[in-house]
Image (spheres, coloured by chain):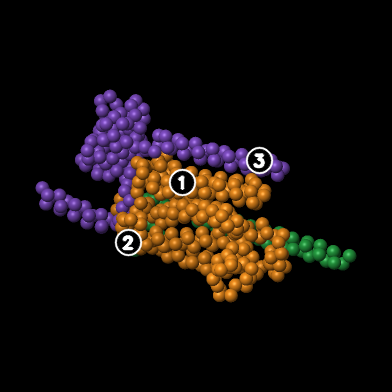
Chain colours: A green, B purple, C orange
Amino acid sequence: MNWESARQFWEMGGYGFFVWGSYGVTALLVAAELLLLARRTKQARALATQDAALARIDAERRSGS
Amino acid sequence: MKPRHKRMALVGAGVALLVGAVALVLNAFSDNMVFFFTPTQVAAKEAPQNRTFRIGGMVQDGSLQRQPDGTTVHFIVTDTAHAIPVTYTGALPDLFKEGKGVVAQGKLREDGVFAASEVLAKHDENYMPPEAAHALEQARKAQSTVVQ
Amino acid sequence: MSEPQSSAARLPGAPGFNLFHYASPQTFYPLAGRLLWPCWLLAAALCAIGLYIGFFVAPTDATQGDSYRIIFIHVPAAWMSMVVYLAMAFWCIVGLIFNTRLSFMMSSALAPTGALWAFVALWTGALWGKPTWGTYWVWDARLTSELILFFLYCGYMALQAAIDDPRRADRAGALIAIVGAVNVPIIYFSVKWWNTLHQGASVSLTAAPTMATTMLWGMLVMALAAWAYTVGAALLRVRAIMIERERHTDWVRQLAQGGGSRT
C-alpha cells in the first residue's frame, strides 16, 4: 500500500495539483462527451420520429383523397 | 446568424486552423527540429553564433556548484566526448540532478561559458520503484570499484 | 451468420458470412446498439482496475515521485489519439474505394473522441512537464507534432460542419484525414529522429519495456479501458449520425415508428 492516510493520497507526494488536475479534467471531458452524445442521440431520434409522423400523415392524406 | 454566414465563419475557422497548423509545421521543421545541440556539436561550431540556442546533455557528476548568492549555480554539461561549463541564476526543476539529463537555453559567451536563461530537466524513459533504483546504483558502484 | 437475411447484400461468389452485409446502415444500426453496453461495462471495469493498479499497487517512481502517476492517463490518451486518427484515415480510404456511406459516417463518428484524446494527451503532458522538466510547454518535435494532430482533428470537424452536402463534406474531410495521417508516424518517431525534451518510448514492439511490471500493467489496463470507451463512444455517435443523415429513408422511419426507445 502506497498511502497511509487519505490526506497523503490527496497530496500525492506534493504533486496533488498536477496529478488531480490531469485526472479531473480528463474525467470532466469524458463526462461532457457522454452528455453531448446522449443529447445528440435524443435529438436525432426526436427528429426521426417527427419525420416519420409527417410522412405517415402525408401518406394517409394521399390515400384518402 | 444566417446559415451562409455561419458556413463562412466555419470555413474561415477551418482555413485559419489549417494555416496555423502548416505554419507550425514549417516553423518546427526549420529551427525547432533541432531542439538542442550537444556539447560535441557546439565544439564543432554547429550551434548558432551570437544567438540564443539550447544545449542538452548530462550534468557532470560533482560539477554542480551553488554560488554564495544562493540562486546562481555553475555546472558542466557533458555528452562524455565534450563538456561545456554553464552558469545559471534562478530556480532549478525538481529533477535537476548531477548525472541526469538537462536542457539549457541561453547564449554562449566569449569565454566559452554558456549563460543559461532557462534550465529544464530531461528525464529518461525508465520508471522504477526507489528500491530498484537503489539496487541498480549499488550494482553500478560495485562494478566501478571492481574495474578500478 | 451463416444465413444472411438479405441475399441481395451478398457479393457474387462471397462465402456464407458476408462482411458487406454489415456495411449498410440499417443492418449495422442494431449491431452497434447491441455492442454499446458491453463497451461501456468493459471500459468502466478496466478503468477501475487500471486506476486501482495505478494508485495502489504501482510503487512511487524513484526519480519523479508520485507525479509519474499521470502516465496512466497520458500514455493511453496519446496512443488513442494516434490510433483513432489512423482509424479515421482507414475508414475514409475504404469509403473512397468502395463508395460505402457507412465508412464515412464511421470516420466522422471517431473524430470528436480522437480530438478529446489528443487534447487530454496535451493537457496531462503539460501538467506532467511542469513538475518534472520545469515547464508546461516546449516547442520540441514530439509536443509540436501532437499539437498539430489536435489541430488536424479540429480542422476535420470544422470542415465537415461547414459543408452542408454530406457527400462533399465526406470527401473534403477524407482529404484532411488521409493527408494528415502522415503526421502520426512523425509523432511516434519524433523522439528517435530528433533531439527532443520528451523522453523516448518506455514501451515498444522492438525492445523490452523500461518500466516496473506493476506500473506497466496499470498503463496497459488503462489503455484497454480507453479502447473500450472509444469504441463505445464511436458506436453511439455513428448511430446518431445514421439517423440524422438517413431520416428520410424507409428504415429510419420504420425504426422511429416501431418505438423510438428500442435499440
For mark 1, does the 10 Å Cα neighbourhood hold few (<14), some (14 to 19), or many (20 or more) residues?
A: some
Between marks 1 and 3 in the image, the one whose residue lies nearer the viewer: 1
At label 2, which amino acid type do we have? Thr
At label 3, which amino acid type do we have? Met
The circle drawn on residue C213 is 2
Residue positioned most to the right = A65
Query: Pointer 1: what residue?
Result: C183
Q: Is residue A31 left or right of residue B145?
A: right
Q: From mark 1 to mark 2, how far is it between C-alphas? A: 31 Å
Q: Chain of mark 2?
A: C
Where is residue C226? Give x, y as percent.
47, 59
Secondary structure under the numbered disc 3 in the rendered image: helix
Q: How many numbered discs, if any?
A: 3
Is disc 1 in the same subunit as disc 2? yes
Q: Is residue C6 left or right of residue C218?
A: right
At label 1, which amino acid type do we have? Asn
Where is residue B72? Give x, y as percent.
29, 33
**Residue at (10%, 47%) from the top-left corner?**
B148
**Residue at (62%, 63%) from the top-left corner?**
C24
Relative to C143, is C87 above or below? below
Query: Pointer 3: what residue?
Result: B8
Residues at badges 1 and 3 in contact (C-beta under 8 Å)?
A: no
Q: Chain of mark 1?
A: C
Secondary structure under the numbered disc 1 in the rendered image: helix
Q: From mark 1 to mark 3, how far is it between C-alphas? A: 27 Å
Residue B28 seen in the current view: yes
Residue A33 seen in the current view: no
Between marks 1 and 2 in the image, the one whose residue lies nearer the viewer: 1
Q: Chain of mark 3?
A: B
Residue positioned most to the front = C13
Where is residue B12? Give x, y as percent.
61, 39
